[in-house]
Image (tube, rainbow, N blue to C red):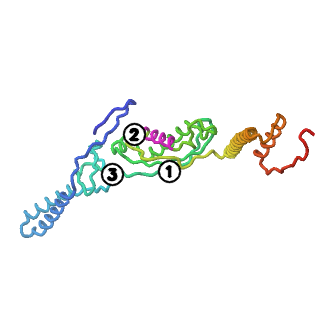
Amino acid sequence: MTESTHASGLTRSREIPASASSGYLMLVVMLAALVAIGVGAAGVKMNPGFGLALVIAGAIVFTFVAPGFYMLQPNQAAAITLFGSYKGSDRDTGLRWILPWMGKKKVSLRANNLISERIKVNDLRGNPIEMAAQVVWRVTDTAQALFDVDDYKAFVMVQIEAAVRTIGSRYPYDDFTHQEITLRGNHDQVGAELRAELMARLAVAGITVDECGFTHLAYAQEIAGAMLRRQQAEAVVAARKTLVEGAVGMVEMALDMLSEKNVVELDDERRAAMVSNLMVVLCGERDTQPVVNAGSLYQ
């Protein structure tokens, strides 16, 4: 078994090819042994010595060959061991054969889709949020998956939760000023960082992550109502700001056009009155009711 020593002092396994062979040739050998047993049993009466020897030889060959067979499906591997020592991994599909005293443990190399449970995390600003992630992972090194961790499937579950907590506490849930990277507003960037975090954590188990992302992201129930009211208030303030900025521009344009075309001469008092009236009309939430002034502004 190829091994390397990590900085922590742990010995890491490395997958190597196993010296297994095709099982079809050995299947022919086993069938020939069965035929020999049958022929020997039939010839015992005619030639007891030869027949008994043929039966014994056929039984020995059959007993030796039969335990060595195993089957591998596509995207499946078998780790081969000899008295507890790793001797390699077989990734060839079909009927395979190995010496009967060698152990075989199958490992699936197929992609696994996992959705984690919802967990409560405090974001960068200390707000409690609920998060859940969807992860597509698969085994790439069978030796590490089997011999470097106790249960690689349980290991994946624990590391996914730890990675989600790490990423969740690294960023704020939301930023109303849109000046920071947030969990809610930067899905692609945060998802890529979650994948990198998971791959670093799962490398010790010979597992890679093909895809990951958040399936649930929301404020925790105890602050969800307050945060919703805050979002609504922020939205109202932003809308008002845009409305006022547009109204000021329209008033400025109206006054400039009136002055350029000499439609009416406006002194400071009349200009202030027109600005006030236009701002009320443009910024009011309700329809304004016009009042016709039949007299003079100075009366």
Instruction: Give, as a three-letter code, the residue at label 1.
Output: Ile
Location of residue 9 (image quadrant) = top left
- At x 35%, y 42%, the residue is 144
Label 1, on which residue? Answer: 115
Q: Earlier in the sequence, mark 2 or mark 3?
A: 3
Q: Is residue 53 above or below residue 148?
A: below
Nearest the viewer among 106 and 73 is 73
Q: Main secondary structure of the magenta part?
A: helix
Give the residue displayed 36% in from the left and 32% down from the top. 6
**Residue 40, numbered circle:** none
Residue interval drawn in magenta: 188-200
Furthest-right residue in this view: 299
Q: Is residue 196 magenta?
A: yes
- Element marked by disc 2: helix
Q: Name the spot of residue 133 as percent of width and height, x first.
A: 51, 47
Q: Position of residue 253 (x, y in %)?
A: 71, 40
Amino acid at the residue labelled 3: Lys
Which secondary structure, mark 3?
strand
Q: Is residue 123 magenta-colored? A: no
The quadrant holding residue 145 is: top left
Question: What residue sits right under mark 3 in the picture?
Answer: 106
Q: Amino acid at mark 2?
A: Ala
- Separation of residues labelled 2 and 1 (CA atoms): 20 Å
Residue with the most extreme left position: 47
The circle drawn on residue 203 is 2
Q: Is residue 262 above or below residue 75?
A: above
